[in-house]
Image (tube, rainbow, N blue to C red):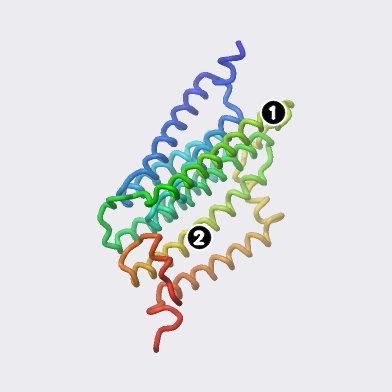
């Protein structure tokens, strides 16, 4: 029976769908939230969704290069979180709030 | 096959629920806690996909280090629960929802169109010792990229300290 086969045989596409849903959630957080730190969390969510699709393809193709790429993406994501949080701290020192609107008032 | 499907759907529901809570909670501390749970669920998915080493690194780096960094920075600020967590504006809000829906549609459409993108040959076998093969690949073929990554982390550490020590911007009087 092919109809239940699609749902029961977990393959590449199921993981790609999960990855697409998580990526969309992260993107909605970046577009819609006001808080800078929650926007950074949305970026982390998007990076993790991409990592998931890399690993799903690595499993499907039996090729370890995808996992190496995930390793590099994780390192760069950690560095990016550090830089973003340092910028948030320095903006908070000046404006005493974490709204993304306060970035509009930066003057040197 | 049935057990595999049950495991996948359970962990997928877990992930989607906590990712939704991450982006919809009004209090940023709650967002960070839900994001930790999302990262742990993703480590579980990586384990299902036979990437044991990456699952461990995910737990250590994301659910450990990065999220501790987020929570520490949130503790530095005096943040009340936001009354309006989402940004204002009717037209811009509509445009944002619209563009988010279009991009989500693109992502799901790409996933749908990728059915059958990998030819169904005989199932590829991953080597039995993935971590060993991963380390051999990392220290031979990708050695220069690995070293460049180390240099980049050093530069980022120095840069972050410089940025967080700025007193009054670049035009401050000394």
The answer to whether dots 2 and 1 both sit on one chain is no
Is residue A12 found left or right of B22 in the rendered image?
Answer: right
Judging from the image, mark 1 belongs to the subunit labelled B
Residue A68 placement (x, y as % from top left): 63, 49
Dividing the picture into quadrants, the one containing residue B76 is bottom left
Q: Nearer the viewer, residue B26 or A16?
A: B26
Residue drawn 26% across the image and 62% down it: B78
In what element is the residue under mark 2? Answer: helix
Give the labeled residue for mark 2.
Answer: A80
Give the labeled residue for mark 1.
Answer: B116
The quadrant in which the N terminus of chain A is found is: top right
Is residue B122 found left or right of A66 in the rendered image?
Answer: right
Look at the picture and state if A2 lies above or below A65. Answer: above
**Which label was assigned to residue B37?**
none
Residue A40 placement (x, y as % from top left): 44, 55
Residue B145 placement (x, y as % from top left): 66, 60
In what element is the residue under mark 1? Answer: loop
Residue drawn 61% across the image and 41% down it: B130
Residue B15 placement (x, y as % from top left): 44, 36
Q: Residues within 10 Å of mark 1 (few under 14, many from 20)?
A: few
Q: Nearer the viewer, residue A60 or A49?
A: A49
Residue drawn 64% across the image and 45% down it: A66
Could you tell me how far apart the alpha carbons at marks 2 and 1 are, in whole angstroms?
35 Å
Q: Nearer the viewer, residue B150 or A32?
A: A32
Q: Nearer the viewer, residue B116 or A103?
A: A103
Dividing the picture into quadrants, the one containing residue A10 is top right
């Amino acid at each position: 029976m092919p109809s239940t086969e699609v749902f029961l045989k977990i393959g590449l596409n199921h993981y790609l769908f999960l990855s697409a849903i998580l990526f969309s959630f992260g993107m909605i957080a970046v577009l819609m939230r006001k808080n800078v730190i929650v926007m950074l969390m949305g970026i982390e969510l998007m990076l993790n969704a991409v990592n998931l699709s890399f690993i799903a393809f690595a499993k499907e193709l039996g090729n370890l290069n995808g996992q190496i790429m995930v390793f590099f993406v994780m390192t760069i994501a950690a560095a990016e979180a550090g830089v973003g949080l340092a910028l948030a701290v320095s903006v908070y020192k000046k404006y005493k709030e974490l709204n993304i609107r306060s970035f509009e008032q930066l003057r040197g | 096959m049935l057990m595999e499907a049950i495991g996948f759907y359970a962990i997928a529901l877990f992930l989607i629920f906590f990712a939704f809570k991450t982006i919809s909670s009004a209090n940023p501390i709650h967002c960070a806690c839900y994001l930790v749970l999302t990262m742990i669920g993703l480590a579980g998915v990586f384990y299902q996909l036979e990437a044991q080493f990456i699952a461990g690194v995910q737990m250590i780096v994301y659910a450990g280090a990065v999220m501790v960094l987020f929570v520490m920075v949130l503790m530095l600020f005096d943040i009340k629960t936001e009354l309006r967590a989402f940004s204002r504006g009717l037209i811009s809000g509509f445009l944002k929802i619209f563009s988010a829906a279009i991009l989500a549609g693109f992502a799901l459409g790409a996933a749908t169109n990728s059915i059958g993108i990998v030819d169904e040959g005989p199932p590829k076998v991953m080597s039995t010792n993935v971590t060993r093969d991963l380390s051999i690949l990392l220290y031979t073929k990708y050695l220069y990229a690995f070293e460049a990554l180390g240099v980049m982390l050093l530069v980022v550490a120095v840069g972050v300290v410089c940025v967080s020590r700025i007193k009054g911007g670049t035009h401050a009087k000394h």
